[in-house]
Image (cartoon, grey):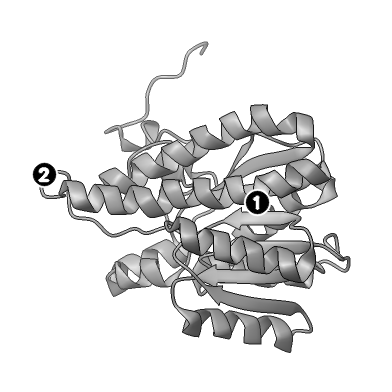
Amino acid sequence: MMQPNYRRLEGRNAIVTGAGRGIGQSIARKLAMEGAEVLVVGRSLGPLADTVTAIESAGGRAWALSADISSEEDVKRVITSALERWGQIDVLVNNAAVFDEPPFLEVDAATIREIFDINVVGTFLMSQAVAKGMADNRKGSIIHISSIDALGADGPVTAYSATKSAVVSMARTMTMELAPFGVRINCVAPGFVNTDMVHKTSTPNVLEHMLNDFTRVPIRRLIEPEEIAAAVAFLASDEASAITGANLVVDGGLTSNLFVMETLPEPMIPLGG
């Protein structure tokens, strides 16, 4: 993938949650490449250290803190540490989320609550803590990683899909309340992305199909994490200064097609012939 020859986030400070692997790691690396100093946050310090090493090896600046974003105490510790180091926070990317549940008839209330605590409450806690300083500074960008699961079901993930819908809705309300303070709120909704999770949950034949001939997706392949990161970096930058309240879908055209015509037994008769 061609890299830009400019640094749109030079001199800015960014926090990325869930940055130890996959999409989160790609986002952190992209923001650092664009000039930001990045605080990477996650529950396990080991993967975060790998992200920091990758960023520093490429000439960027990053540091790591382990935290559970569903914990008010941990969120306060992260924000306090960031402000002590930087003085202000310019960008927050809420990427941390869990995706592990049984089908609807088997899932229990405890699992539902745990997933909502991380995916929704954690996003709220981080956003509110960061937005207070951004409002005082009259500028800032907060980006939630949502999902095409907020737009339609694609598997037995009741809680996950519901949390992503909640995150999109939360962003809309945040947009209305925070726009007068110069703070922009947006979402990026990935489609099927080439991450470890896809590899772990796919057979070799399914993975080969998704990587090279994904019939259901107009571009016929999985999205790469770097492509999600590029969308996030754009929304974080001043080039997106008039964009707030958006849910930018990055899915290779998947949700643009209802996939009805392709499943009919034969083509319909065209009108106007």
| Cβ atoms at labels 1 and 2 below 8 Å apart | no
- Quarter of the picture containing the N terminus is bottom right
Location of residue 27 with respect to 190 vertically, above or below: below
Location of residue 3 with respect to 186 vertically, above or below: below
In the image, taking residue 218 as reference, residue 35 lies left or right, namely right
Type of amino acid at the residue the image marks with label 2: Leu
Can I make out residue 246 in this image? Answer: yes
Extreme residue toward the top, this view:
272
Residue nearest the viewer, comparing 66 with 272: 66
Type of amino acid at the residue the image marks with label 1: Val
Taking the spot 37% from the left edge, 23% from the top edge, the residue there is: 268
Determine the image quadrant of residue 10.
bottom right
Residue nearest the viewer, comparing 123 with 58: 123
Location of residue 48 with respect to 255 vertically, above or below: below
Label 1 to label 2: alpha-carbon separation: 38 Å
| Horizontal and vertical percent position of residue 146 | 50, 47
In the image, taking residue 107 as reference, residue 229 lies left or right, namely right
| Horizontal and vertical percent position of residue 212 | 46, 65
Mark 1 crowd level (few <14, some 14–19, many ≥20, 10 Å Cα): many
Q: Which of marks 1 and 2 is in front?
A: 1
Mark 2 crowd level (few <14, some 14–19, many ≥20, 10 Å Cα): few
Residue nearest the viewer, comparing 103 with 53: 53
In the image, taking residue 74 as reference, residue 90 lies left or right, namely right
Q: Secondary structure beneath disc 1?
A: helix
The residue identified by callout 1 is 130
The residue identified by callout 2 is 105
Instruction: Specify the label residue 205 is tagged with.
Output: none
Q: Secondary structure beneath disc 2?
A: loop
